[in-house]
Image (tube, coloured by chain):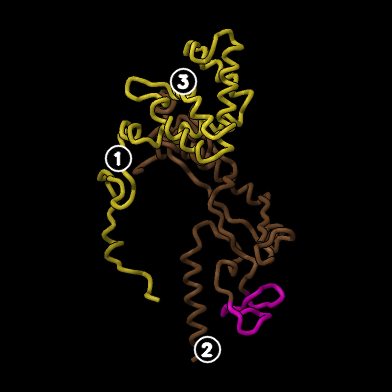
């Protein structure tokens, strides 16, 4: 699609789930929406919070008996307020642009979640997992190079930053090996 | 329900689909366009086939309860009224029915074309996109790569 939602997403309401009504009113309602819809996504930055974590599942394991990772997440008050703020601003922008109807989904559970944190970088072994070179404070010669070293998820896609940090840590490994 | 039970209710399914997305001057009804998709997804899932088949039975029974000999004998207005009743009483069935109907209908090449779009697959050439007034990107392209080869 060059613009707007695809034909199917226009009918189903996309991520908002505001489906076009079926029946005699369907064609008119669909024509009012198709190619006349814009979607605004609000992406927040969760603070590091103990309740949001990845640990080992006490019951679920793979075929070798290795515990599966368990992802726990609760939307905090801070995150909720950020999302509500963004939704309100998006509504203002859409209505200022002439939108006749604005629908929103307060939390897109099936959205693209970036699982980050839990192995933060820092100088103090008491408050961080790896040092500034990517080395684990507690395990000699162990480097951690992935999204877990970031304290929060940021508000945008993290891959470029993860790649940059990976290059930086790799350079250090090579330098110290030489 | 035995496999293929939904296909055995094909005529009733066509009428129901046509009530969900009726034909108009420019667009066909879902009974023509979405039928194959609905039957295909039902054939791939015994649970879905059972859900839809049982739901159609409920539709037929609701039509009879409204004083006609069957859904097929009801007027278009009465058919929609019956379906509204079933939508309220059997929400799971109706949710699945409408979702798969819309998927089949708005994914069909005939409908996509009438919406003014290219129905072809994205791969390998991608969709044709009309020229647009893009911002001047010469400064960006002249800048060259801002990454280094790793």
Left/right placement of residue A51 relative to residue A43 reads right
Viewer-side residue, B146 vs B12 = B12
Task: Please name the residue shown 49% across and 77% down the image.
Answer: A168
Q: Same chain for labels 2 and 1? Say yes or no.
A: no
Q: Which chain carries label 2?
A: A
Residue mark closest to the camera, 2 vs 1: 1
Which residue is identified by label 3? Answer: B15
Chain B as rendered: colour: yellow
Task: Please name the residue shown 52% across and 12% down the image.
Answer: B78
Left/right placement of residue A98 relative to residue A137 reads left
> Chain coloured brown: which letter?
A
Sort mark 3 into few (<14), some (14-19) or many (20+) by Cα contacts within 10 Å: some
Q: Which span of residues is magenta-colored?
A: A122-143
Q: Can residue B1 be seen in this view?
A: yes
Q: In which quarter of the image is residue A154?
A: bottom right
Which residue is identified by label 2? Answer: A176
Residue mark closest to the camera, 3 vs 1: 3
Marking on residue B118: 1
Q: Is residue B34 magenta?
A: no
């Amino acid at each position: 699609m060059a613009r707007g939602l695809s034909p199917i997403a226009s009918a189903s309401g996309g991520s908002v789930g505001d489906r076009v009504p079926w029946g005699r009113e369907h064609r008119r309602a669909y024509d009012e929406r198709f190619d006349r819809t814009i979607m605004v996504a609000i992406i927040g930055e969760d603070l590091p919070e103990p309740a949001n974590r990845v640990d080992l599942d006490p019951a679920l394991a793979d075929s070798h008996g290795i515990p599966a990772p368990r992802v726990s997440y609760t939307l905090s008050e801070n995150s909720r307020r950020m999302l509500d703020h963004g939704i309100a601003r998006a509504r203002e922008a859409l209505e200022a642009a002439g939108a006749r109807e604005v629908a929103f989904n307060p939390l897109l559970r099936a959205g693209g979640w970036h699982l980050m944190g839990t192995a933060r970088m820092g100088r103090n072994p008491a408050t961080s997992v790896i040092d500034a070179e990517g080395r684990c404070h507690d395990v000699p010669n162990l480097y951690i190079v992935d999204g877990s070293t970031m304290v929060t998820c940021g508000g945008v896609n993290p891959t470029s930053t993860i790649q940059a940090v990976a290059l930086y840590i790799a350079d250090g490994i090579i330098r110290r090996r030489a | 329900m035995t496999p293929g039970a939904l296909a055995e209710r094909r005529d009733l399914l066509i009428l129901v689909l046509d009530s969900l997305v009726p034909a108009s001057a420019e667009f066909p009804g879902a009974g023509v366009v979405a039928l194959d998709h609905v039957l295909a997804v039902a054939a791939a899932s015994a649970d879905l086939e059972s859900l839809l088949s049982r739901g159609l039975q409920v539709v037929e029974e609701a039509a009879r309860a409204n004083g006609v000999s069957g859904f097929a004998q009801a007027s278009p207005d009465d058919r929609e009224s019956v379906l509204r009743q079933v939508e309220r009483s059997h929400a799971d069935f109706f949710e699945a029915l409408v979702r798969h109907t819309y998927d089949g209908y708005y994914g069909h090449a005939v409908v996509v074309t009438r919406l003014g779009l290219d129905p072809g697959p994205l791969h390998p050439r991608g969709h044709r996109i009309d020229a647009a007034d893009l911002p001047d990107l010469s400064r960006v392209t002249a800048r060259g790569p801002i990454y280094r080869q790793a």
